[in-house]
Image (cartoon, helix red, strand yellow):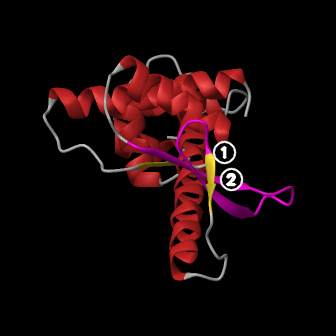
Amino acid sequence: MGPDDYASMQEVVRRRYTRMMEEKTPLPDLIITDGGKGQMDVVKEVVVDELHLDIPIAGLAKDDRHRTNELLFGFPPQTVGLNVKSELFKILTQIQDEVHRYAITFHRDKRSKHQLHSELDDIKGIGPKSKELLLKKLKSVKQIKNSDNQTLIEILGASKGAIVYNYFHPNEEQSK
């Protein structure tokens, strides 16, 4: 994790706990970071030092093979003796695995939506509602590209349908 990652992490933590305080949502009894001392320090700077919240912070540290091998707690962080075969350790690693799965899926979906969005954005005269309609009916940019002029006209009307068709088929005459 580099400096930008720490700054991003601080921003997420700041927004989350500021919103919880503003909405008077119950605060957690414990914050568990996905990482060791560095991540714990970043969370502490926001939660304890900046927002003045009294919430204990723990960290799940990994070994050199990127496997969770210890639980850290307190400042300075102390290793909490946990048997890696214990139920508690299994639950903590399952939580960690689920967080990783969620983050990977979130970022993959975000990249995917951005790629679709940016390609359709290049079509002058086609706004967000038309793009949404095309994707709803045809499911993908690839399907939109492969659609004939008549299909696009049926979805968007003559003018916008022709714009989309001509964008993806610049060297062909429109088939009516």
SS at badge 2: strand
Residue 69 inside the magenta-drawn segment? yes
- Where is residue 79? Give x, y as percent: 64, 55
What's the residue at 33%, 21% (across, down)?
A: 51
Q: Is residue 17 above or below residue 144?
A: above
Q: Amino acid at mark 1?
A: Gly
Instruction: Say which quarter of the image contains residue 97.
Output: bottom right
Q: Circle 2 sits on which residue?
A: 61
Q: Is residue 167 above or below residue 124?
A: below
Q: Position of residue 126 (x, y in %)?
A: 43, 24
Can the viewer see residue 37?
A: yes
Position above or below: 135 against 39? below
Q: Is residue 155 left or right of residue 43?
A: left
First reached walking from the N terminus: tag 2 or tag 1: 1
Apparent side of residue 56 relative to residue 63 in the rendered image (left or right): left
Instruction: Report the front residue among 42 and 16.
Output: 42
Give the crowd class for mark 1: few <14, some 14-19, many >=20 residues within 10 Å: many
Q: Are marks 2 and 1 in contact (CB under 8 Å)?
A: yes
Residue 24 x %, y %: 13, 35
Residue 159 spot, x, y in % from top left: 39, 25
Question: In the image, what residue occupies the spot 48% across and 30% down?
Answer: 44
Foreground of the two, 48 or 66: 48
Q: Residue at the spot x=17%, y=26% of the render?
A: 22
The answer to which image quadrant residue 15 occupies is top left
Secondary structure of the residue carrying numbered label 1: loop
Question: What is the number of the mark on residue 126?
Answer: none
The residue segment tinted magenta is: 56-77
Nearer to us in this view, 119 or 101: 101
Q: Is residue 103 in the magenta section?
A: no
Q: Name the residue that disc number 1 marks.
A: 36
Task: Please state which amino acid type lies under the numbered disc 2.
Answer: Ala
| Mark 2 and mark 1: Cα distance apart in space | 4 Å
